[in-house]
Amino acid sequence: MTLKRKKIISIACVTIFILMSAAVFWFVGRPMLEFVSQPEKFRAWVNGHGIWGRVAFSAMMAMQIIIAIIPGEPLEIGAGYAFGIFEGTALCLIGALIGSIVVFYFVRYFGVKAVEVFYPREKIQSLKIMQNQKKLNTLTFILFLIPGTPKDLMTYVIGLTTMRLSTWILITGIARIPSIITSTVGGDALGVQNYQFAILVFAVTIIVSIIGLLVYRVITVRGAAKEGGKSYGND
């Protein structure tokens, strides 16, 4: 296959993915978020479908990771409400892990154009620090561990780095726990009608997220300054 033909096929595939993503968000993502935002109805549906309700929820979480414009927090809060802290956290992690693996392979194959489906080039370039092989694993773990960092963006950018899939699975499977569990704890508190505790959890989460976002900006700005001149391949 010639380079030109391969490039045409790649552009066509990415274009199809953009159209499919928009369609999935409109016809599936929006109704899904509306459904989860009705806690009692969502819990009744989950209880009525047994194991398949849990499989469906994990699929929703995976879809949220893949279609990055779908927000994840409502799903995580809904998981805490419907399943409780431990099961809700586990189901969120399973779905996030599946979605992260799909995104990893997608970006590895199509390159930076796959990331630009959801994020402009300047945002991608702001994470040049993740090209630092010596610090890649450590920085990725830290940034995913801190609530408030743009994990959807980083999930897509990881595929542009040299990180191995096994390392990525380990990092995303462990480092996402604090961020997810804060949402499921709040959702569980709402489920048992402990509204004061729920408000406290969400307030603390917002504060920690703001701090995390500030830390993320400091790390990426300093890193970009030190790593200046590099760019992502597979243009």
Image: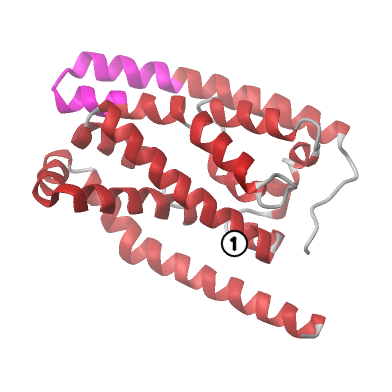
The quarter of the rendered structure image containing the C terminus is bottom right
Q: Is 105 or 12 nearer to us in this picture?
A: 105
Q: Is 169 or 10 nearer to us in this picture?
A: 169
- Give the x, y percent position of residue 121: 71, 54
Q: Is residue 4 above or below residue 219?
A: below
Residue 233 found in image quarter: bottom right
Query: What amino acid is at disc 1?
Result: Phe
Crowd tier of the residue under label 1, counting other residues whose Cα lies within 10 Å: few below 14, some 14–19, many 20 or above: some
Bounds of the magenta segment: 185-206
In the picture, measured across the screen, residue 187 lies left or right of residue 95, that is left
Residue 164 falls inside the magenta stretch: no
Residue at x 47%, y 18% (from the top left corner): 207
Residue at x 81%, y 37% (from the top left corner): 132
Q: Is residue 51 above or below residue 191?
A: below
Q: Which element carries disc 1, helix, strand or loop?
A: helix
Residue at x 78%, y 42% (from the top left corner): 131
Q: Is residue 116 visible?
A: no
Residue at x 29%, y 34% (from the top left corner): 88
The quarter of the rendered structure image containing the N terminus is bottom right
- Give the x, y percent position of residue 85: 27, 27
In the picture, measured across the screen, residue 107 lies left or right of residue 95, that is right
Label 1: which residue? Answer: 106
Residue 188 falls inside the magenta stretch: yes
- Give the x, y percent position of residue 31: 26, 57
Dominant secondary-structure state across the stretch colored magenta: helix
- Give the x, y percent position of residue 55: 27, 51
In the picture, measured across the screen, residue 103 lies left or right of residue 157, that is left
